[in-house]
Image (cartoon, rainbow, N blue to C red):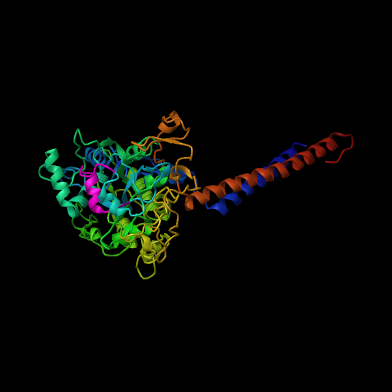
Amino acid sequence: MTTSRHRWVRHTAVFTAALVLLATSVLGAPGPAFAASYVPISGSGSTWSYNAIHAWQGNVAQYGMVVNYAGVGSTTGRNQFKDGTIDWAASDIPYGVQDGSNFDPPPNTRTFVYMPDTAGGTTFMYNLNIGTTRVTNLRLSGENVAKIFTGVLKMWNDPAIAADNPGLTLPAIKIVPVVRSDGSGSTAQFTQWMVATQGQYWTAYCAKVGRSPCTQTSAYPTLSDSGMIAQAGDLGVAGYVGQRQAVGTIGYVEYSYAIQAGFPVAKVLNAAGYYTEPTAGHVAVSLLKAKINMDAGNPNTYLTQDLSQVYTNSDPRTYELSSYSYMILPTNTNLGFNTSKGYTLADFGKYLLCQGQTQVNALGYSALPINLVQAGFDQLRKVPGQQLPSVSADFIRSCNNPTFSTDGTNTLANNDPQPQACDKKGPTQCTTGTGGAKTSTPVKPGAAGTSGPGGANAGTGTQGANPSASNGAGAGASANAACDPDSGTCDQGGTGSVDAADQQQVPGVPVDASGDFGDTLEIILMVAASILLLGVGLLPPIIAQAGVRRARRAQPGGWR
């Protein structure tokens, strides 16, 4: 009987092991040694690229990678990398940029390289109502953007803004610019654009705030009586503008924050005379004109960008405030960095350059082109401890990046549709919402535009109509809401006051995007469920049969 019991136990064990082996062979899942080879790594810096980095962090966790990241602003990230308190950094601007009388030199004892990680657009997220209707189709010229953020334009019904928006009768309420309170790459990119394209307004503003020399800056200067609000991080700016009672505000954030918050962004007039927003395709088109420093012999500038030709790009699809953000990677092992961390960091970089780029368009960024992905792998191979495979052209193309093509051109840019006819500067105006607010805003009779080549429906509503859609923040206030005629703030309860629900912030909450790794996790869960079902269905009969055999053996003359 003992021998038979052992035989039954052995058969059951073999059966279970076979199921596990089958599951493992089907999944190709990494074994325990795979996860054990990774060690935690930490980084900090850009909030502009935080939403993408946050998604990548979550996606690689299932492989045993612990990637910590703090969105504290590009300036703090660069300083922490220089001091050796983090393993890697993310920044929208490189070291060595002149900021007024300040200079941010590269680290003295820590060698490094830059690697592009995200491409996207700096947008102007706003909170504005006409009566009880949320405005989602605002247009602004570059001149008016600069005037708003230098205190020249103070009211939303200013004739200069009305000229951009022939279909809207904007309210007579104050403009409240919301800027960054921390050192940020977003501020640096925005002010560099003003220096290059709207120099007269930025120069005059520098004189008002006592800034000399009048260069771009990472820390936005404010005047005590300017009415500006300063908030930390893209999330802080988006959260402030996203408050229901913050009608009249406008702030600059990366496009993904407006999408996550469900709020619109202003379409900005480009050099071709079209008002555009930074869709993935428009950013890809814009950055075809970016000059990338390809001198690999100078790590302090290699792969950094010159955006001057992006600002003047004559392609109608251009969004002028498009740019790249970077990871700053160590290339030596001092200040606490070692080869074990380098192995993990290189694999994380490999993930974000391939699978990670397939996810970023949905998050509000634009996938990197093939030349920068190839250059990114070259940079990763300089990290101590990396064990990346040889990177061939076939390997790069296997990333399935939406920008890649067999002839090396940017597919995302090639396939990007032209803007709608109603986006052209003139007497018509599109009604469709922008950013995260997709509800249409009615326009004046006679100003409604029509769809242009490849454009979405422009709508033909007229101002004063009651839009029926109510998806999140993009919807107008309810018909029975009480509105303050001076502030434009509407109370949903009709009491004329702002209740507690209206005071809740609507921050840009990052959302993980499903990628190839995410699909694998789903398969694992399905197979695990299948194993459990098989166990429930098969193990009880086996156990019951064994019990019958034991009972028969126990009877006098029972068979053995």
Q: Nearer the viewer, residue 387 or 53?
A: 53
Examine the image and state in which quarter residue 236 appears.
Answer: top left
Give percent across and percent down for residue 222.
20, 37
- Asked if the magenta segment contains residue 149, the reply would be yes
Q: Quadrant of residue 250?
A: top left
- Give left or right: position of 131 versus 124: right
In this picture, residue 400 sits left or right of residue 370: right
Q: Residue at x 16, y 51 (%)?
A: 199
Image quadrant in which the C terminus is located: top right
Q: Given the current orientation, which residue lies at the most extreme front position? A: 445
Residue 22 picture location, percent across and down = 61, 51
502 or 156, which lies in front?
156
Residue 64 within the segment the image draws in magenta: no
Magenta-drawn segment: 139-155
The answer to whether any part of residue 93 appears in the image is no
Task: Write the residue at 39% across / 67% down.
Answer: 405
Left/right placement of residue 464 relative to residue 425 reads right
Quarter of the view holding residue 68: top left
Q: Is 435 placed above or below 219 here? A: below
Q: Choose between 75 and 541: the one closer to the eye.
A: 75
Q: In this view, does 270 lie above or below 504?
A: below
Image position, residue 235 (x, y; %):
35, 39
Q: In which quarter of the image is the N terminus?
A: top right
